[in-house]
Amino acid sequence: MEKRIINPWQWQDQRSYVQAVEIKQAAATLYCSGQAAVDATGRSSTADMRSQLIEALQNLEQVITESGYECQGIVRLNIYSTSTAELFTCFDVFQDWIAKHGIKQASSVLEVKGLFETLNVELEATVVK
């Protein structure tokens, strides 16, 4: 796979995303359903935003690795949240996870009226190798 990052500016670097990602000669592409703070039994979390974000990231990582991909291959990562104000108070969790895996992804953050049951944050990814 050949990956090219397009950033006409530098301000997005502090926000842990890029403006565009071009992929050439990808061997395969994985489209992940939205991952949230749902445990192995299918029960939705009732925890706070920070805890739900941590669990959602863990679930996303598990789906990616069990599929034979690497988190570094994430090229698009959308974040859905019931409160962007609350999400941004724990955005360091997200940024640390992005840095840990060396991810350079296009992203959108969207505030939604609601998510499934008691969920407050959901992550949707596209991964290539």
Image (spheres, rainbow, N blue to C red):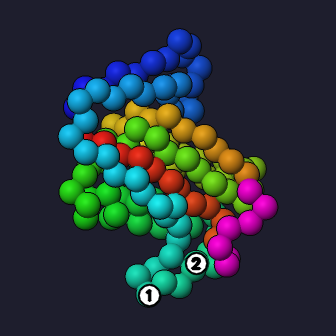
Q: Secondary structure at mark 2?
A: loop
- Percent x, y of residue 78: 55, 47
In which quadrant is the C terminus drawn? top left
| Position of 105 relative to 78 (above/below) | above
Q: Answer yes or no: is residue 100 visible.
A: no
Name which residue lies at 31% across and 46% down.
Answer: 29
From the viewer's side, name the closer residue of 29 and 127.
29
Whether the magenta-drawn stretch holds residue 42 is answered as: no
Residue at position x 67%, y 57% in the image: 81
Q: Residues within 10 Å of mark 2 (few under 14, many from 20)?
A: some
Q: Which residues are magenta?
A: 112-118
Which residue lies under the disc numbered 1? 41
| Corner quadrant of residue 6 | top left
Rendered image: mark on residue 109: none
| Mark-to-mark CA distance, 1 and 2 | 11 Å
- Give the x, y percent position of residue 46: 63, 79
| Residue 10 location, quadrant | top right
- Left of 54 or right of it: where is 50? right
Looking at the rendered image, the quarter that the N terminus falls into is top left
Residue positioned 57% across, 33% down in the render: 15
